[in-house]
Amino acid sequence: MTRPPSDRFQPPRFGTDGLRGHAGVPPLDPETLRRVGAALGLWLQRRGPDQKRVVLGNDGRDSAPWILDALAQGLAATEVASVDVALTTTPALAYLARTEPFVAGIMISASHNPAEDNGVKIFDGAGRKLDDAAEREIERLTTDCGFDTAGEARTRSKPELLDRYVDWLGNRFVGLDLEGATVVVDAANGGGAELAPHVLRAFGADVVAIACEPDGTNINDGCGALHPASIVATVRQSGAVLGICLDGDGDRCILVDDQGTIHDGDSLLATLAPRFLAEGRLPGATAVATVMSNLGLRRTLAAQGIKLEMTPVGDRHVAARMREGGFTLGAEQSGHVLIDVDGALVGDGLLAALTVLGLPGLRERGAASVLARFERFPQKLVNVRVAHKPPLESNARIQAAVAAIESELGEDGRVVLRYSGTENLCRVMVEARDADAMLRHTEALARLVETELLA
């Protein structure tokens, strides 16, 4: 299998959520993916002599079959077997990696990205995304893996394993009765297109399924968690108690209440944190969120005696802080909600939705009566194209501008600057109680960042 590394081969670089890019273009090309599969296999073999099996799934994109085949060829070259559960969600795949006799899981998905993109998320045998050190080691190992001829992939098809995930949810919410309740679910034409309606119907719900017909090219196309407004009319017209919007791989959840109001991850955290506290399930009276969460959320929770710890953007950072602090609830504004379930941190859009559906009074009074609302500070995010990514703190002009804005806004606003983990973008966000000031500062700072970093 091994040979001297090709001079033209560039090892992949894992981003904030695995490998991601345009399907067919490095690092999402067959050669790189075979090397990634082999590198993962080598990394797994070095961790013990036991028989190695890896579970794989995908979110329904056209490119998924050949990506799976390339990864499986690399795994087979290192004597690691693979099992394919086909169309699924990232949290269901992580559940199987955690609870079945697998040493790792691979989800083939680009999450909320358009259909022409794809990606690879790798989980360990505990259902956790690989940490930075493991990803760096796999990157290094790809340079040692080459293929004169493609090996034969040893992949077994076992979609029936997903029944175990469905059973787990049923046992987790054993008292949930949705008989006679209408629920709208939008699965973004992605990994949850079959699972989500099936699970909700198992609880007795009358399901109105939207964007649950993946054809390989329509994932996230005007639907799902990125476009929750698309189901507002359906929720109202159907008399649904709740509308659920998942993203392409099902780990995000944006809700629409019975009055048509959209609720993001901040709203879900504002709803669940006080309830967890009242139930004695919020250690240290602390929840975890990212720097993108609205300033109004922090003030709302603080007024209820709940501290909000902040992390960089990315559910992996939220999860890491939760594990470090022993916390049980965290969320991103984008709809990632992480809940401690029997010692495992689970980021699952469907689990979050079922948790809300089980809140007291929702069936009788509607979701609008139980989902929290709070004063949101006006917030604007601008993506600025950059040519390079020097440390932002090293640019004196940008830092001076940020300091001036923060001085003017005081406690009624803030600035967040960060680079995208996967694209040449700098994300400029300004939040302020005064909307005019927020817009003025956002536009001025975005122009400055472009001037400084595009050259």
Image: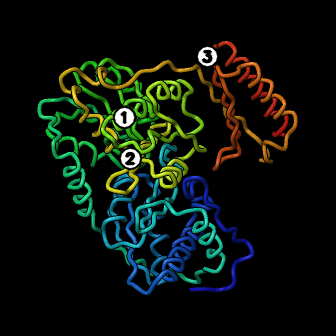
Q: Which mark is residue 433?
A: 3
| In this view, 407 is above or below 311 | above
Spot the residue most to the left.
179
Q: Position of residue 168 (x, y in %)?
A: 23, 55
Q: Give the position of the N terminus as an image quadrant.
A: bottom right
Q: Which residue is mark 2?
A: 339
Q: Could you tell me how far apart the alpha carbons at marks 3 and 2 are, in whole angstroms?
A: 30 Å
Q: Amino acid at mark 2?
A: Ile
Q: Is 139 displayed left or right of 43 in the figure? A: right
Count every numbered label the image shows and give the total: 3
User: Label 3's element?
Assistant: loop
Which quarter of the picture shows residue 3?
Answer: bottom right
Mark 2: give few (<14), some (14-19) or many (20+) Cα within 10 Å: many
Q: Position of residue 38 (x, y in %)?
A: 53, 77
1 and 2 marks in contact (CB < 8 Å): yes
| In this view, 397 is above or below 192 | above
Q: Position of residue 25 (x, y in %)?
A: 61, 58
Q: Amino acid at mark 3?
A: Arg
Residue at 41 percent across and 27 percent down: it is 263
User: Label 1's element?
Assistant: helix
| In this view, 31 is above or below 382 | below
In this rendered view, identify the residue nearer to me: 3 or 404: 404
In this rendered view, identify the residue nearer to me: 349 or 432: 432
Q: Could you tell me how far apart the alpha carbons at marks 3 and 1 are, in whole angstroms?
A: 25 Å
Q: Which mark is residue 272?
A: 1
Q: Amino acid at mark 1?
A: Leu
Mark 1: give few (<14), some (14-19) or many (20+) Cα within 10 Å: many
